[in-house]
Image (spheres, helix red, strand yellow):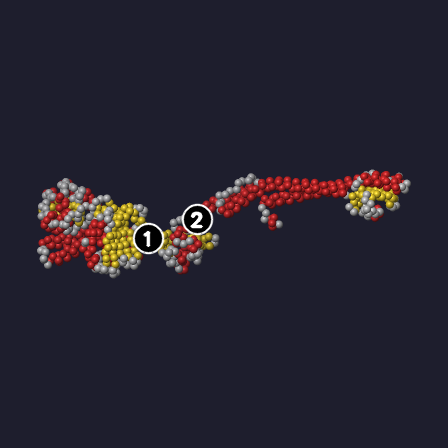
Amino acid sequence: MRRFRDLSIKKKLVFISMLSSVAALLFTLSIFFIGALFATSSSTQERIASLARVVGTNCVAALAFEDPEAAKETLKALSAEPQIVSATIYKADKTLFAEYQRDPRKPKTGAMDDIADEKPAGNGTGQVFKYRFAGGQLHVRAEIELDHKVIGSVELSSDLKELYHRALLIALIGLIVLIFSFLLALAISSMAQRTISGPITTLTHTMNQVSEQKDYTLRVQPAGHDDIGMLIDGFNTMLAEIQARDEKLYFTQFSVDHMADAAYWMDVQSRIVNANHAACDALGVSREKLLAMSFSDIDPSFGQERWHEIWQNACARKTVAFESSHLRSDGKLFPVEVYANILQFQDQQYLCAFARNIAERKKLQLQLEQAQKMEAIGTLASGVAHDLNNILGGLVGYPDLLLQELPEDSPLRRRVMLVKKSGEKAAAIVQDMLTLARRGVELRNAVNLNEIVAEYLKSPEHERIMAYHPQVYFEISLAEDLPNILGSDVHLSKALMNLVSNAAEAIAESGKVKVQTRSCHVQNPLKGFQTIAPGHYAVLRVEDDGIGLSDEDLVNLFEPFYTKKKMGRSGTGLGMSVVSGAVKDHKGYIDLHSIRGKGTSFDLYFPVTHQMVQAKNSDFVFEANMGTEKILVVDDVLEQREVACVVLGKLGYQVAAVASGEEAIGYVRRNPVDLLVLDMIMDPGMDGLETYQQILKIRPGQRAVVASGYAETDRVKQIMALGVNGFVRKPYSIERLATAVKSALKKEPGDSGTMVLV
């Protein structure tokens, strides 16, 4: 029975159909066989009874006259009937009268009285017959009557070969009919079962495909409107509903797996029971490994107490948010912002946490804070630069005048020189602060890094660094045919000096500082300390084999006033801030590499230009810069006016001075001058731009030199656009002021195309 249950529906249908057909056929053939056998038996009995009646009739005379021989002759006539085995005539007293035996070798049959199972039967003529089957033969007995008186009986024994032959023939015919009927039933049932098993087989096959492939887009072809058709329609509807649900679930799972934020699901013991792809990528672990971890494994700050606190807060408030740090597989921590809430699924609570990597935001926040700090320092620098430069004007300008008057062997020259150097150092600090504020950088001139390095190596600043670090070897490697860049040689030289000074300071005892230039073409964005955009660059490299930078140093390196140098050897802690500001002003990039204990390298990338470097003037000669023109000095600071007047007077110029823009306008209206030396910032009252605009209305084409502590501001750009002939940086020195004035007086009025900045 179990094997039948395991058969396919097709085989079951065929088996049931064939079993039903065979059972019906067997029953029908059995009835037919029995009926045919009964009919054949009855026919045989009738035929033998007829023979017995004929024999009995023919033997009446023999019995009546007691003539056994005549009876025997009559019986011999039965030899013509091959089925008759024997024939016997009995007298009325049942004694043997005459006998016929086809095969004399066979034993004779007994007397009629010995037959106990004979069965009388009527033949419809009133004569009584008795039949019996014994010994494989049919025995028929008929009474012989004469004048309605029984005078004897005749008994015929017939073999059953004919009966058996007919029965076998009937059975053979039945078997043939059964076989053909079986084959016909098999064919019909096979064809018929397809209408039932075919759709069911297709349904089963589709179901197996769906189960194996998880493809819910498959459908079963409709088979009609019967029960199977309804089953298929229901199955297709179920598949459609599963497909729609699966697509929604897939979209949801896909969205969760591919979202940028890491997602974790944890039970009350903080075990991670599920996580998305972003979580695995963020931590650098496989999904299997992550699901074997707890939340404390990825967040070292989560002990049992904090986890319990977070769980309780989430249960109470449904959502909690906090910042923490997650641990990557390589041992590095990165900052994250976590939002978590409690979810209940199948009567169990889970903490669902979304963790966002905020390293970039922290970096931007740090950069913003740095920019705000730089802006604050810049505001401070711009606020005090004017006053500091005015104060330093005397410390820088007057020593130059005194040195001009003192003889070479005067013992005062050294003291005056110390005063001058102190003033220049103070002015340099102010310039550092202005550079920090990203003010005062002029990028109109082409410069070459090789020339800047060469000039720096001859400078007193470099000689001082070498004196402080006698065991440090300086290796210089300059690329040939290095392309030019647009920039300020002063600021670039200042940046180089700070890098070299820091490199030498990083070497504890003996070591090497390498200064190198090269040309570099970046084809794809180059990611380093900063991402360098594609382009052609001239690169300045300063490398040392010192102690390297710590993580704290790397974070705070470009912070203003951050320094670890030895006190008394270097400046104000603005060095690296000046480097960063100079690189930004030159639209360049910084790439930094440092290995603790092995050294540090700085690569400064500057965009190249096709402009040529202008030839520099020869060494300053006092007599070559003298003149007799009329010059008006406009400055609100007495010391600056006096320094300018004395210097210009020494140079032979006719000098006048006023303290405000309003006074300058009135003076120029009454007294034409060849040149204005015009301060940009004058408080209170009109500044340099407004003053020059008004003077141009009175004296179109009036020559002017702007004096300011800033090389370039929006107001300075505007006044230069009006035709200013030169620019001189405060505090004044004889060389800078004389050069600017002489150059401006050589130009045509209003010509600023070759303006010189000094």
**Residue type (three-letter) at the residue carrying disc 2:** Gln
Identity of the residue drawn at 22% across and 44% down: 611
**Residue 120 against residue 413 in the figure, above or below:** above
Return the residue nearer the eye: 189 or 159: 159
Q: Is residue 201 visible?
A: yes
Residue situated furthest bottom in the rendering: 509
Quickly name the residue at label 1. Answer: 362
Return the residue nearer the eye: 60 or 193: 60
Assess disc 2: are there few (<14), some (14-19) or many (≥20) residues with their C-alpha within 10 Å of its C-alpha.
some
Say which element carries label 1: helix
Please give left or right for residue 409 compared with residue 559 in the image.
Answer: left
Say which element carries label 2: helix
**Residue 221 against residue 424 in the figure, above or below:** above
Give residue 49's position: percent from left, percent from top. 81, 40
Quickly name the residue at label 2. Answer: 253
Identity of the residue drawn at 42% across and 55% down: 290
Identity of the residue drawn at 16% across and 56% down: 422
